[in-house]
Image (cartoon, rainbow, N blue to C red):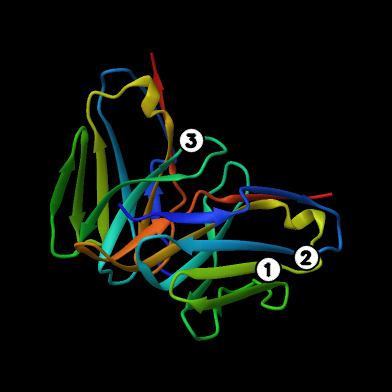
Amino acid sequence: SQQGEEDPQALSIQEGENATMNCSYKTSINNLQWYRQNSGRGLVHLILIRSNEREKHSGRLRVTLDTSKKSSSLLITASRAADTASYFCATDGGGFGEGTQLTVNP
Amino acid sequence: GAVVSQHPSWVICKSGTSVKIECRSLDFQATTMFWYRQFPKQSLMLMATSNEGSKATYEQGVEKDKFLINHASLTLSTLTVTSAHPEDSSFYICSARGVSGNDYNEQFFGPGTRLTVL
């Protein structure tokens, strides 16, 4: 499987600040997806970026993909307390990263 | 976006019984389905990958006789936890990959099934 790895493992910021999370993977991909998960709940699909795309936006989310470095980043701008969750990247090969636990303090 | 459902949402069973979890893709044909398990405060761990009509490919350390996977149609995969024991208690999540609308090869996750074995 193509296991992704996120860093940082945990991130704590103040409301209004931006949060950046990174993900690296090991093998070639067709696409990479970011998900969030609230404690004890299911996964919520945030955004998909394909291997031929470099950047994608969705609301306050911005995702970049660098296939040469096999890495992706997720930027959440103007964070809110409700953004507190775990964020995972996943590749189309089924691999899933360890996740970043984001805490946004009001 | 496409929807993947799981049934049941949660199940409590006695040790030694078998439990079947269903994963359905509701509006697209899933050529591939993945099964994961997740322990509290941990990431998802891929258990197996199944392609419609063929045997599932299990990840290292996952017992295929313990976790039976059937992917008999393009919209349904099942995971059966046989002779469940308390250590099998976990959150089981499936995902489905296939052609959906304008997006190809996108992967959608089910809401998960919480299994508690007493």
Q: Position of residue B45 (x, y in %)?
A: 54, 59
> Which residue bears the numbered disc 1?
B80
User: Which residue occupies 13% across, 55% down?
Assistant: A54
Q: Is residue A33 left or right of residue A53?
A: right
Q: Residue furthest bottom?
A: B54
- The type of residue carrying mark 1 is Thr
- Label 2 SS: loop
- The type of residue carrying mark 3 is Asn
Mark 1 vs 2: CB contact within 8 A: yes
User: Which residue occupies 21% across, 32% down?
Assistant: A60
Marks 3, 1 in one chain: no
Q: Position of residue A26 (x, y in %)?
A: 35, 67
Q: Within the image, what quadrant is residue B92 found in?
A: bottom right
Please name which of the two marks, 2 or 3, marks the residue nearer to the observer: 2
> Dot 3: few (<14), some (14–19), or many (≥20) neighbours within 10 Å?
some
Foreground residue among A20 and A62: A62
> Which residue bears the numbered disc 2?
B18
Q: Mark 1 or mark 2: name the one nearer the start of the chain.
A: 2
- Label 3 SS: loop
> Which residue bears the numbered disc 3?
A38
Q: Residue furthest front?
A: B27
